[in-house]
Image: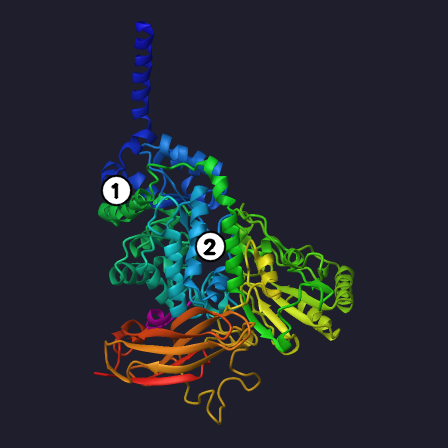
Amino acid sequence: MPCLRSRASQIFTLFFALTLLHPLCRLSSQTPKADDLLRKMTLEEKVAQLSQLPGFPIPEFREQAGNPEDVLRKYGAGSVLWVTDPKERNRLQHIAVDESRLHIPILFGLDVIHGYRTIFPSPIAMASSWDPKLVEGAQTIAARESRAAGIAWTFGPMVDIARDARWGRMEEGAGEDPYLGAAIARAQVRGFQGDLGPDRVLACANHFAGYGAADGGRDYDSSYIPEELMWNVYLAPFKAAADAGVATFMSAYMDLNDVPATGNRWLNHDVLREAWNFKGFVVSDANAVHSLIIHGYARDGQDAAQKAFTAGINMDMASGTYLKYLADEVKQSRVSMREIDDAVRPILEAKIRLGLFEHPFTDLSRMDSVLNSPEHMQASRTAAQRSMVLLRNEQNLLPLDKTGQKIKSIAVIGPMADVQNDLLGLWGAMTNPAQTVNVLQGIKNTVGNAVSVEFAHGPNLRRDIPSFFENVPMLTVKEQPKQTSEEAQRAFDEAVALAKRSDVAVLVMGEIALMSGEAASRSSLRLSSGQEELLEAVVATGKPVVLVLVNGRPVDISWASEHVPAILEAWYPGSQGGNAVADVLFGDANPAGHLPVSWPRNSGQLPLYYNHNRTQAPEDAPNFTSRYWDLSSKPLYPFGYGLSYTTFSFENLKLSRQEAKVGASLEVSVEITNTGSRAGDAVVQLYTHQRAGSASRPVRELKGFQRVSLAAGAKQAIHFTLGKDELQFWSPTKKQWVVEPEQFDVWVGEDSTAKLHAEFRLTP
């Protein structure tokens, strides 16, 4: 026995020694500090940390930098992009942790824009909720699921201001307004990051900046934005994200005032680092560093690496340009080692804060329980309910009866009624989505056997897959099959016939996911592929019609706004979208979403936004002659608009004082009453206007909002504060932020045309 004990002791000693020598255990024993790692790193290892490797084959990367796995083994890497399989993420992480010299873990990045397995409504939809707490909760769940699957970095939130609905990426943001956009940006950063514990991810504010102002709404085209408009409008949500502690920024693709955003030092250094004191790191958009050559800004790859790096881009996303050229820039003294260290440090610090050195691998045994949480699905359903916007409801057609007493049969018609991943939007369908409940199934789930439900698909919706996505392994959406003219006519006739023999027709129309998002700008907002014609034919049957829109941007519904009695904007509603649409249609949820964009009559009005300046012949003047002679210059539905199944009244607008000194705050209060017969939510909105000053000021600007729930007949006082943050602006004449002694108007109501008015004066 003594001999056996001695042998056991020897085995234990050997095991303990080997354990201490294993790189993962060695790292786990004491978390390294960024500066300690920097002192040990070679120049090539530092450049590797400034590089994001592609997680799928990109020929251009191999031409620049070689095989990504060879790079990873030899030097490590800052990050890897778009690896969809958790087992593959673990395999690559083992290469980094076990085989690279310094065992620095990888930061895996993915476009988790509004959910990983549980997909929430698209960002423009969640902005329509006007409920930052809901948005924060949704992104907290997105972070929890992402982190459980090994993703520690999301390329969200997208906080670009979008005033032109032709621009496909409007669906990824919060719309046209800087105040609402800032509130939603803060909420998303809080949700994704929190305190960066084990269930949180790094957030990334993108695309910095002005991307949403592309000429003609054409994705990637140049933006020309004067400095005062940048500060007052386009930079506001980015500043809010920075103030909320966002860990990373992503540069934009386009030229900004003739300097590409990825090579724009004014943006990435002067504004971000100097003015805002940002301490995190900036990643380029995919291939954007190498694309500086295509822009005509860089003469070759080496020039592109130098210009992007000195502009303030820490990490090169998947182009391999830094890997090929940046070390040479140091050796030739065009970039200093100190600059390299300063760029690498925040990347290492982010990995340390995330706990990747202690826990680099995905726990596959825990992952499924997190990803398949019923509570997450219920949260998605609630978010979709609260995000939908009721645009029209004549004769109170909605909510529909689900008991079978008033309605015996429902025709569900349209190419968006039976889709699944197309309810998720482009990015929602590219992570690892759960099974989606479509609208047809949601209606059937709600009415059960009480009401007969029949379906006709109608026309198929097609758009070729953009070349940008042809080789992306995550893409799970596609165009619907092409129909011959005979097939299309037969589908059309079947849909109309179904409407004729049903009590009510619910038409579900809009855009498949490929029609909205990146590389998906449109010249026309018209309902495509024969949808408009089918809608008009069904209305001509004389049956009551409900139009449900599934889309990522406003579409042209000018005809429908006059002829269709009920219109519900569902946006891309997410995993539980079908159930949530049915909840709203049948009154189990009372719609209370409000538009985060001005809804155009047609694309000829674009760009369109409520917070424009007055002209010398204002549109509300008696002899109005400016703008269009063939179309109203006003939107079809104003910014902030949304109906409910109940009604609200506003009264007793009061200011704490009618005069205050510059820099002081004043309180605004208003009473809101639910004047209808059922409980509902109102979105109380406050707008201001400065009547004169060192610059013309917008006719109205949102400066406060609250979503409030009221029982039928209930009344509540709502309070706002107007202070420096709400009343200041960047003056183009003074070249600084100012609060000016002038006369101000205040309006409170349910949208940007609110009538309840008061005024006050600021004095020196």
Question: Please, what is the three-letter code of the amino acid marked with disc 1?
Answer: Ala
Indicate left or right for 32 with 647 as reference. left
Quarter occupied by residue 544? bottom right
Q: Secondary structure at mark 1?
A: helix
Label 2: how many residues lie within 10 Å, few (<14), some (14-19) or many (20+)? many
Q: Position of residue 593 (x, y in %)?
A: 50, 68
Sequence-wise, the earlier of marks 1 and 2 is: 1
Question: Where, by quadrant of the figure, is residue 414 drawn?
Answer: bottom right
Please identify the quadrant where the N terminus is shown.
Answer: top left
What residue sits 32% from the left and 62% below the top?
267
Above or below 393: residue 416: above
Q: Is residue 265 visible?
A: no
Residue furthest to the front: 713
Give the labeled residue for mark 1: 34
Q: Nearer the viewer, residue 683 or 617?
A: 683
In this view, the mark in front (1 or 2): 2
Question: What secondary structure predominates along the stretch shown in magenta?
Answer: helix
Residue in the foreground of this view, choosing between 227 and 134 = 134
| Label at residue 113 | 2
Q: Is residue 230 magenta?
A: yes
Residue 259 at what x, y percent from top left? 36, 63
Query: Which segment did they paint magenta?
Result: 223-233
Give the quarter of the figure containing the C terminus: bottom left
Mark 2: amino acid: Ile
Query: Disc number at residue 344?
Result: none
